[in-house]
Amino acid sequence: MASSTVISTEGQTDAAGGAHLIVVSNRLPVTLEQKGSDWSFKLSSGGLVSALSGLKREMSFTWVGWPGKDFGAEDRTKIDSLLQENSCSAVYLDDETAEQYYNGFANSILWPLFHYHPGEMMFEETAWDAYQRANEAFAAALAAVVKEGDLVWIQDYHLMLLPRMLRGLLDRSGRRGVKIGWFLHTPFPSSELYRILPVRRQILEGVLAADLLGFHTYDYARHFLSSCTRILGLQTTGESVDAGGRVVRVGTFPIGIDPSKFSEALQTAEVRGRLGELERRFAGERVIVGVDRLDYIKGVPQKLLAFEHFLSAHPEHVGRVVLVQVAVPSRGDVE
């Protein structure tokens, strides 16, 4: 069975103080492929994978997530062995739960709400039920592997109930020394918009069981704090929430890429050859490059219309300015 060396942990250290770090996300950073009776995988595309690739070079951690589909018992055994060799662990969801949780709630309710597209929201109780079941499955899988003193870092809007569910399981088993963090990789909307969510209280209470909550920008953190005050009636400061006697820290942590990965790629023969081809193809022209994930909130159609308008308003640039748009389909079923 082949495995990827990209997420190898050889030569790396644990988190500060020797505590083991467990990263939890909706999807594992791999795409599984079957060849005969064997399984292999390759690294997936996406912002989260890019953001954490640099950390993986410096620190060992276990990555826990959904493998993308359900599998039979025999295949699960093989997949679990392969993933374990590469510091990954799978959370299995039945296909109906996965569909309703991922596309029905996370991406049809939270995603448009958090990106200020409330008109795209489609709230259904069945999707909310699936979201709860999926978060419960993650909590149960984590409770089976988390040890006292570990650090659990939960990622994004797919798992906003998980901190509270996991905290309950850990407290009941006496593992009160586990630290839980949660980071949101999207905007957090203003409290005026967030309050239209029917399950707004449950979502806030879910993440407030963590010890540290992270956001990309100060505005996103401020919106979250405002929601805690206006919806839950909690006292907040600029960087914390008093959640029933527990102080939950709230911070701003801009996340980016691993620049060394791109610097090293520039030195490879393949990239240098491709750059030469592009330089010859666009010689004498100005090139505008856009790189976006293929999603309606990214505004790719609007960008193309804007470029068309620019050329119509300034015909002297026709043939002299070129727009190269790269659209990355990091979700296979995006509309």
Image (cartoon, grey):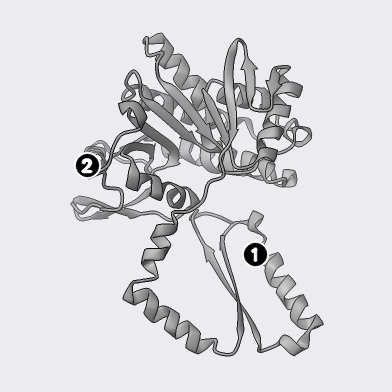
Image quadrant in which you'd find residue 178: top left
Categorize mark 2 by other alpha carbons within 10 Å: few (<14), some (14-19), many (20+): some
Judged left or right of residue 331, residue 37 is: left
Mark closest to the chain's N terminus, 2 or 1: 2
Q: Residue furthest front?
A: 17
Q: Is residue 36 above or below residue 272?
A: above
Q: CA distance from mark 2 to mark 1?
A: 39 Å
Judged left or right of residue 293, residue 46 is: left
Q: Is residue 185 above or below residue 40?
A: above
Which of the image's four quarters has the C terminus?
bottom right
Q: Residue 319: x percent and y percent?
A: 66, 89
Judged left or right of residue 230, residue 218 is: left
SS for tag 1?
helix
Q: Residue 17: x percent and y percent?
A: 34, 26
Hey, what amino acid is under mark 2? Glu
* Residue 178 tag number: none
Circle 2 sits on which residue?
85
Which residue is painted at 38% across and 81% down in the image? 273
Q: Is residue 122 visible?
A: no
Hey, what amino acid is under mark 1? Val
Categorize mark 1 by other alpha carbons within 10 Å: few (<14), some (14-19), many (20+): some
Q: Is residue 158 visible?
A: yes
Circle 1 sits on which residue?
300
Q: Residue 276: x percent and y percent?
A: 43, 84
Q: Is residue 75 above or below residue 275?
A: above
